[in-house]
Image (cartoon, coloured by chain):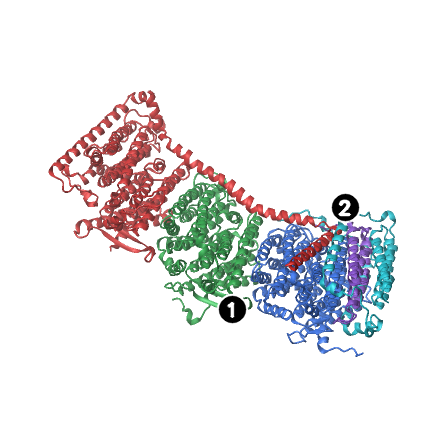
Chain colours: A purple, B green, C cyan, D blue, E red
Amino acid sequence: MFSLPVILYLSALLFSIGIYGVLARRNILVVLMSLELMLNAVNIALVGFGRVHALSTPSGEHSGQIFTLMVLAVAAAEAAIGLSLLLLIWRRWKTIDLRELCRLSG
Amino acid sequence: MIPELESFNLPILSLVTLTPAFGALLLALIDSNSKALIRQVALMVSFLGLLFSLIMVGNFDSSVGVMQLEENHSWIESLGISYHLGVDGFSILLILLTSFTMPFVFMSTWKAVDHRVKEFHIALLLLQTGMIGAFVALDLVLFYLFYEAMLVPMYLIIGIWGGKDRVYAALKFFIYTMVGSLFMFLAILYLYNHAGTFDLTLLLERLKTTHPLDVIQQFWLFLAFALSFAIKVPLFPLHTWLPDAHVQAPTAGSVVLAGVLLKMGTYGLLRFAIPLFPDAAMDLREEFCWLAVTGIIFGACMALVQTDIKKLIAYSSVSHLGFVVLACFMTDVESLTGAILQMVNHGLSTGMLFLMIGIIYERRHTRDLADYGGLASVVPVYSVFFIIAVLSSIGLPGLNGFVGEFLILFGAFRADPLWGMLAATGVVLGALYMLKMVKAFLFGPVVHEANKEVKDLNLREIIYLSPFVVLMVWLGLYPSSFTNLVEPTLSLYVQLLQN
Amino acid sequence: MSGWLEHLIFGILAASSVASSFLVVTRRNPIYSALFLIVMFGMVAGIFMLLDATFLGFMQLLVYAGAIMVLYLFVIMLINPRDDSLPEEGGFTEKTFAAGVALLVFSLLTFGISNSETVSTLAEAGTIPDLPEVAQTHGAIEAFGYELFHKHLLVFEVASILILVGIIGAVHIAMKTKPAPVELGSNDEERLVKDV
Amino acid sequence: MEPLSLSRAEILAVLPAGFLFITGLIQLLSDLGDTSKTSRHEKTHLAMIGVTGALVAFASLFVQGTLASTGELYAGAMTDDLFGRLGAGVIIVTSLFVTLMSGGYLSSSGNNKAEFHSLISFSAGAMVLLCQATNLVSIFVAIETLSLAVYVLAGFFKENKSASEGAFKYFVMGAFSSGFLLFGMALVYGLSGGSLSLSDIAASGASSDALFAVGVLMVLIGFAFKVGVVPFHSWVPDVYQGAPVLAAGWMAVAVKSASFFALCRFLYHSGGGAYLDQILVALSVVTMILGNLAALNQQSLKRMLAYSGIAHSGYLMIPVVVALSGNDLSIGASLPFYLCAYAATTLAAFGVLTALSVSTDRDNIGDLNGLAKSRPMLALGFTIALISLAGIPLTAGFIGKLMIFSDAIGAGFIQIAIIGILTSLVSVYYYLRPVVAMWFRDPRSSFDLIPAPWGVQFTVGVCGIATIIVGLFPDWLVELSRISVETILG
Amino acid sequence: MDSNLLWIPLFPFLGFLINGILGKRMGNRTVSIVASVAPLLAFSVAFGAWRKIVSDTGVSALHWDGFPWIWLDGLLEVPFALHFDGLSAVMCLVITGVGSLIHLYSIGYMKGDPGYHRYFAYLNLFTTFMLLLVLGDNLLLLFIGWEGVGLCSYLLIGFWFQDDANCAAGKKAFIVNRIGDLAFLLGMFLCLIHFGTLDLAALVNADNLNQVASETFEGSLFAGMGVITGIALLLFIGATGKSAQIPLYVWLPDAMAGPTPVSALIHAATMVTSGVYLCCRLMPLFQAAPMALSIVAVVGACTALLAAIIAFTQNDIKKVLAYSTVSQLGYMFFAIGVGAFSAAFFHVVTHAFFKALLFLGSGAVIHAMHHEQDMRKMGGLRKQLPFTHITFLIGTLAIAGVPPLAGFFSKDEILFAGYQAGIMEGDTLSSLFWYVSVATAGMTAFYMMRCVAMTFWGDSQVDQKLEGKVHEPGGWIGFALFVLAIASALGGFLNVPEFLGGHAILGHFTGLHVSPTDLTKDELVALHAGEFTSMLISLAIAGAGLLVGFLFYRKGSGLPAAFRNSPPGAFLGKLSENKFYVDEMYAAVIVRPFEAISQLLHTLIDQVLIDKLLVNGSALLVRGLGELFRRMQTGFIPGYLLTFGCGALVLIYILLNSMAKAGAQ
């Protein structure tokens, strides 16, 4: 059970759940969380792969983990920007409904 | 009397081509408020262009048919594009026609164009460079470049200084022309990838020897080239942009359009489409000839029912250029000579007609035939010139139009009597619609009050119209001085086709 | 640490992460979503540790659960959407569509994973192989740091810029200014004139 | 444990990006103490710093001296080759012009803040790195850095409702696509023997693995989103329209260039493109068609340029696919060339939009009416830009199209060339609409034209002239592109 | 090589240039001097040339090599060269002679017209072209003149262009002529293809003709037809246009809209006979095409009859003369058709004299009547216009064929030729047409008598207002009438047939006369007997015509009315009065349908189908698609995301699919 394919399936499943969340939800907050979900899913795959390749990897045994660390950093920065944009939207539009942001079209 | 070029090593073709462009640059530096100066400079530049092209003719050896006065420099080496110019029998008369027309076009706009004078003259000069460049270019990309470069100034001329629906007409003109030329562009690129060069002379040789094209390739490539040129001509049924463009264009635009620009199509057929893909051209000959014949008759029928003078003449162009296309697909020297003469003739007669309509439009601001009538008694001198132009247009023997039409009809008749006969009906129809127009325009009682006050030609107008008349008579009575320049090249060309 | 216990722990972690992430995307109230997300992050951290990424597991907890989720919660508090002001969620069709896409993505990925020769080669052992003695420091902070600064120095430095950009951006955007008196960018309502 | 040491080449290679980052920092710091809100024109120093920094960065591109690739630096995180330097050059020059324009532009809208300048500088640095990056992590981090900066730039005028909407759209979709990009990278990493470096990935011979191909495809999707390839294009028009003009220009030119450079390197190096040519052809065709057609009926200039940018991404996909499938190394040279030409042209176009936006917040085509009368030089510059975009001769755009279509035909993709030609015909129509408005129509709108800031005028002028010059004498640039492509392919 | 020949057309051309360019400033007097001197000078040069070929025994023709015109070495060589032989000499003299008289006449006639100088410029130009027509040494040069005279005719018919009807008439003339010219052109092409030249001498060269004679057309339509027949027919169609034969005669009556001297010169004496000239010029070619000749005869005879019938009921004096001209031209073609080229040409000359006289006479009447042309408003004018009356009467008698006036000889010769071809040789068809021509001769006498009677005799119907103002024109008008009257009276003696003791000078001089050689004495006697019979018949019929005409239209005769009241008379009268509705038929069958079809094509094919549907339609389609794509950009983020997701899905699917396929293989 605890093997690479399973880890990958798990990662894919979490990724898909994240996609579902992004696509299905109207609440911007939840959409942002779903995006975090997607990133986390990838992290699992990365760490899993890194673990499998720990001895053979030419880029260093921790390459997968370091990649993950960078994803963490990106996720943090992204969350900061995303949430500040959310605040901005809230101030300007008084809504957190994704669907109401549709003035620009055509 | 003519300076020997060898001793000067003068790049005469570049001079002929680029003089107007430099003139345009010069104009750009002049203050746009000094209109008179702008007009004078433009006129001088165009006369300079005429002078250069006369020198070019003087140095042209009419005893051989090969490319002459060639200039060949590599330009964009990495893409295999060269600056290759040359002149032979196909192009020399057309270059001359262009250089000849432009000064008088400039003279004609003296009064007609009064806003944005500077831009107007710059556009015209650039247009001149584009046209001559297209006639002298021997590199396919260079040709395409000039071919397209003409489009922009013409587009601006129609769009800015045109009539009421100018935007629609200009856009239609532009897009329509682009349709064809883009396909030609693809074909050019295909040829390059096939034979490894853009140079026409090299291409002709390689396609014959080392890099032959198969039937299907030839077919599609020819169609791509021919489509582009057929639109430019314009060949029925691709002609509908022309009436709109003509009607909306200002006088100078119409003159250049009818006088020179349309010839680009037939010139392209003769210079590129047919010699590059002779087999495909011969395979499709019947179809194109039928289209040309249809165009002759259809154009004439359309001209018959027009009430707008410019539209009428535009349709007459469709009809007249049908003759040229018909001749382009013949393989004998007679019809090809006719084709080239007819290009020049059409340039002169239709150019002059448009000039004259411009003159009357300046005075009356209408082009509707119903607004005229009886002008002959008000403006007799004008009427005389107008009738001469009309007569030239309907091919009265003794004037220029006849010589070309005769040669073309003869060639077509020899190739297939039915084509000859049908095309010849175009001559009758030509008389029909032209005289109908003359009757409604010049004759009859003066119905409208406004027409009674119309002023006759002034000296300037007479001066710029007279050279046209002189050339019409010259070409009509002594065409040998022109056909001599053309014939050797055509003989070579015919040999090439027949092999 | 191998054998059945590993499998069991992984199974529990995996199942609860899936469950909590499913709850994240389905809860109507974002507060619950956020809480379940924290749970999910914890589970993922556990998986990391199971995979010998000890340091990373702690980082996961610190950064995600500690920093990011706090940020989320702050924002939720700030906005404080009451139940009735929460956006109305999409109907069945929308959800079905989204679920369809997600499912299809999942099945395609699953198909790819199960058909991948490389994956099957890597998984031949049936489980994650143990690390040999020499690599016992794997995942430890020292080795991790050494590699980070020797092999991924550039990336590390760029990441600092990334964070800086994030800070500048967040500050600029979130900083409160007086709303402009005139509403800019109203051009899209003014498509009155048709040209050409 | 051996100590950390950097080679000379490593230091030289990172100089351009480094200077840009430092520039951004200096701009930030220089503005720290300045709290005055009234002074509109006092902050010219920001732009000056930016320009200086960009110039220094540009100069540092040449210190390497050799045209050959230096091989991998920073343990394979980046390389310093002509291809990367060409991309860096485009980006730095673009940043130079954007900075030049931004001073006056921002002052006129009362938003002249250091953040804008420094975000431009930071993102430029990230883009330069992106062009040079040769491993997955550095690509990822660079791309995310520039994305985050651009998200903020897109919503920089936060008082503006549209801007916030655009920025948020961009952000959500960007993050979504980042997920795909990242997942793809994870797969590529995992399936190529645990290597992050592109060259190792290529050497691992994993390209026949289906999942690996899926990984490459997902990375491609991530890039496709950045450059606005259909069907990942939806954000482009909305974001361009909402964003400040300069930010839109920055996205249109720099982000696209950097992404294409990186995409090329990724596809060529990772060897993952083997099964992608069909997909790339499909993407290219769909993009050309939809981009051009949707641009037809736009009223907003920004939207029109956005769709035109989408269409151009479609054209740019042609050399990508051609180079992937062809064996001829010279093929594919059209990509850097086209990007350079596109950059000059688009900068000129956005420069004109900037000049307009100084006077009005409207950007309808009708607002250009009579511009040729009131601002002939501006109109001329815009016209040149538009006809270059349309691919009409004597402009850089023409040579670019010539190279692209010639390459396509040479590689046997005649159908794609025909579709490209047809769609560029369509494009002529909408490119001419502003020309019509500027030259053929009489001024109608009532707003007063404020003279454009000199930086904008300068940019429009230089880019317009460059467009023509490159159109007339493209030889050097063609050669440069060819050599640069050979450095990554060879 | 005789470059003097060039001066023949050049003098009038100079006159044209001077009058055309400077005329307005020179004053009418100078204009008239220049205009009249030009043809007179041409006449004198032509006369000199004529003297040369008459006196110098070795020289039968003069030639001016000119310069290359349409000249492609070895392929198509058409020089601009003039040729002066007997035929052209006579034509030249007639043109310049009669032309000069008409110029002089016009001085009086056109006095005070605002377009005075224009008129004379046109007239000079016409003379130029007409001379070029007869002097040209090849068909193409002839064609210049051919179309040139058409142009002048067009300009002169529409001379008073303020009136729409005049312009319409001019236009009609030009167009109808163009139709004929089309055939002419095609004929030339055939010549070029089969003879390789357009040189007139080469075309009638016996060797060449023999060579071409065997060639026939290929293809379905005219398969088997001889090439020469084709050429002859096409050229003849050209001639029907210019010389107003069925079916292209309709323009000539309308052409009377021009000033009367123009009608005299162009539409009676010279231009309209150029078709006959062409046939005479190419006599051997036509002779080599008997089938063509019989068609010529049929057309000629029919035209003669038809025009004569129409002339019966015309009330406009010029229209009567116009139909008479058509009829006489028909005669000439009839003569050609039966092979009597000499007779035809002779009739050309005499007809030039008396028809010019008649027109000028009618012009004098019209001038005196202040441009009243309706004969019903005349009558009894012999008192006021005695001189005109006398000259007109001479013309009438001449055309009716009263000996020894000019018409008698020429007409008699034609009738005899018909008689010979029909009755004497027993050819039914030819006999039939001979009867027709004889009947026409009688009708000619009749309607001319009617014309004289209505105009000059009987009671005056002149408008009261004009009463007393009508007076004899003097000066140049009188002079021209006088000279032409003498010519009409004596012109016949140019070609007195041999059996009357003459020598057929004209026929021999022009080389058209076919003298019956190697005839036995008996045959000669029979021939002369036949000729005598024919002459008697023609005399009788002319006398009868005159007599009946006199009876009908003498003072107080009720016969016309009685005739018109009888049913057949009413029917025929109406038919004749309406010119057999030919114009209406043409309008209904050709002109109007053509215009309607053009209009239809314009709206339906050109505007709707091609322009709207195909051109703008495709543009609209593209824009519609663009609009669709634009609308797809809804602005909803979930929509965008969904697009993104679906796009990714599809791509991944395609990839996996293609890889699975590749793997399976």
* Residue E622 x %, y %: 61, 49
Residue tagged by mark 2?
C93
* Residue C21 x %, y %: 83, 56
* Residue B97 x %, y %: 44, 57
Residue at the left extreme of this rendering: E521
Determine whether B169 is above or below E300 in the image. below
C99 relative position to E236: left or right: right
E630 relative position to D3: left or right: left
Q: Image quadrant for the C terminus of chain B? A: bottom left
What amino acid is labelled 2 in the image?
Thr
Q: How far separated are the C-alphas under marks 1 and 2?
A: 65 Å
Mark 2: which secondary structure? helix
- Between residue D20 and residue D106, name the one nearer to us: D20
Which quadrant of the structure image shows residue D267?
A: bottom right
Determine whether D75 is above or below B401 in the image. below
Residue tagged by mark 1?
B74
Badge 1, how many Cα within 10 Å: few under 14, some, many 20+? few
D141 relative position to E262: left or right: right
